[in-house]
Image (cartoon, grey):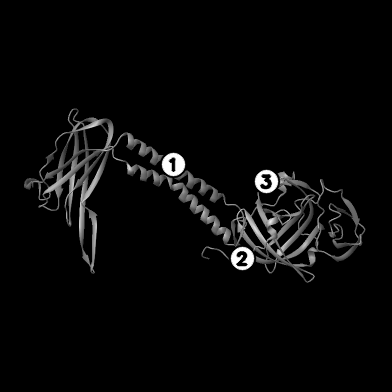
Amino acid sequence: MATVSLTSFPASEQAYCPKCDTPITLYDPKGSEFCVCSACYSYIRFEKDEPEKLKTLTKPKLKPTLPLGTEGKLNDVLFKVIGYIEKDEYDVRYTWREYVLYNYEKGYATLSEFDGHWNLVYGKNFLPKLEKPLDGKTYVMYDDVEYKLFHKYGADVKAILGEFDWDVFNEDVNIREFIAPPFILSKEESNVGGKKETNYYRGEYLELNAIAAAFNLDVNLFPSRVGILSNQPSRAYETWNWAFKTSILLLLAMLAIELIVVSFKPSEVLMDSLFNLASAPEKGSSEFQPIKSSAFKVSDVSTSLEIELSSGVENNWLEATIVLVNEKTNQTWEVTKGIEYYYGYESGERWSEGNQKGSVLLSEIPGGIYHLNIYPASGDAARDYINVKIESNGTLWQNVLVCAGLFSILPIVSFYNMRNFERKRWSNSDYSPFEQ
C-alpha cells in the first residue's frame, strides 16, 4: 500500500536489479512491493528488503508521455508519476495506457489514456463512498447520479515500467463500466493468487491541455485525440442546453412584452356589422353588389386592425375584397380574404374541412375616421349575408408564433447535433439505447 500520512513526498531511494545490477529509483520506497528494471525489464519483488526477480517482461511499445518522477497538480492534488502500464482488452485490439499517480496524503490514483482521451481515476482512498458496493445490471446510482452500463470486458497487462504496490502481472481482472459523462464508474473484480476482490473506481474526463499544463509538459508531445470516448463530455449537449434555455427566456420575454402592451393598449371592437348581400347579375353569377360600411374611428396614433369575415357557407365558398379608406386623406389599404366550409359522410364517418370565418391583419394603421368598401363574391348565389368585425390593438399572436419558430431553430439544430454525438458515442457499446 502507498505510504500515507506524510506532509511531502518521501525522499526517493535506489534499489538494484538482481539480474543486471542497474539502479532503480523508487519514489515511494516504503509502499512499493514490485518494480521493473528499465534496462533489462526484469519484474522484481521486494521481500525482506531483498529484491527477487520474478520474470522478464516485454518492453513497452510506447515511450510514456508522462515520464516517471514527473510531478503535477490535478484537481488541487499534487501527484508524482511512479508507474506506467500498457493494457489491452481480452480478444479485442483495444489498447490503452495507465499512469500510476502517487500522493503522499491519500495514496494512489490513476491517469488513463486511450486514443488521446484522458481520465483521472480515483478509488475509495479519495472517494470513501466507493467503499459501498455499487451493483446493477444496466445502471448504478452514485451521489444521486445514474450511471448507465456501457461496457463489460477483461483487461490484460502487456507491459509495465516503474513501481507498484500490487502484483500487476498476476491479477485476473473483469471490469464493468458505467457512464454519466464526464464521469465513469468501474466495477473491477480481480483474482490474485486465488484471492477474489471487488473494487470500485470513478474516472473523470480531463482535457489534454489541462494535463499538459498540470505536469508542465509540451502539449504537442501528447498523442492526438481520436474518435469519441465513452464518458467524453458533449459540447453539442452544452450548446443545446444553452440554446434551449435561451430560446425559452426569449419567448417568455416576448410574451411578457406582449402582455404589457395589451395591458396598456387593450383591444377595442370598432365595428361588428351584418351586411345583406344583393346579387349583381351584370357582374356575373358569383359576384354581389358592393357594400359601403358606416364610418368608424381609430383613436390610437398607430395601431393594428384585425378584420374578421364570417358567413354561414355550407359546401361552398365566399370571398371579399375589402378596401379600408381614410375619409380625410383618401389613403386606402386593400386586402382579399376568402372562407370556405365543406362537410359530408364517407364510409359511415362524418368529415369536414375549412371554416365559416376567417381574419386578416392590417398593421400600422394611423388614427382617423375610416369606412370599408366591400366587394363580395360567392359560389352560392343564394348567400344572403356577410358579417364584418373590426378589432384594434389585437394581440399579435402571429408575431409570437413566428418568433417562437425562429427561436426554436438553434435548439432544434443543436438537438440534432447532440443526438448524433450520442449515437457515435454509443456505437462503441453493446448496450446502446439507439437502434443498431
Name the residue beneath numbered marker 3: 209
Can you tell which of label 1 and label 3 is closer to the viewer? 1
Tell me which amino acid carries mark 1: Leu
Residue 407 location (% of width, % of height): 43, 45
Q: Quadrant of residue 304?
A: top left
Q: Which is in the foreground here, disc 3 or disc 2?
A: 2
Q: Secondary structure at mark 2?
A: loop
**Spatial CA span between label 1 and label 3:** 35 Å
Residue 235 horizontal/vertical position (percent): 56, 49
Task: Check disc 2 and report the residue beneath it.
Answer: 136
Which is nearer the N-term, disc 2 or disc 1?
2
Residue 46: x, y in percent? 88, 61
Q: Residue at x 18, y 52 (%)?
A: 317
The reply to whether residue 218 is visible in this rendering is no
Q: In screen coordinates, is 148 left or right of 91?
A: left
Other-residue count near label 2 (Cα within 10 Å), few / some / many at <14 / 14–19 / ≥20:
few
Question: On the image, numbered disc 1 is attached to which residue?
Answer: 250
**Is residue 268 visible to us here?**
yes
The image's mark for residue 204 is: none
Position of the N terminus by quadrant: bottom right
> In the figure, 89 relative to 115: above or below?
below
Q: Earlier in the sequence, mark 3 or mark 2?
A: 2
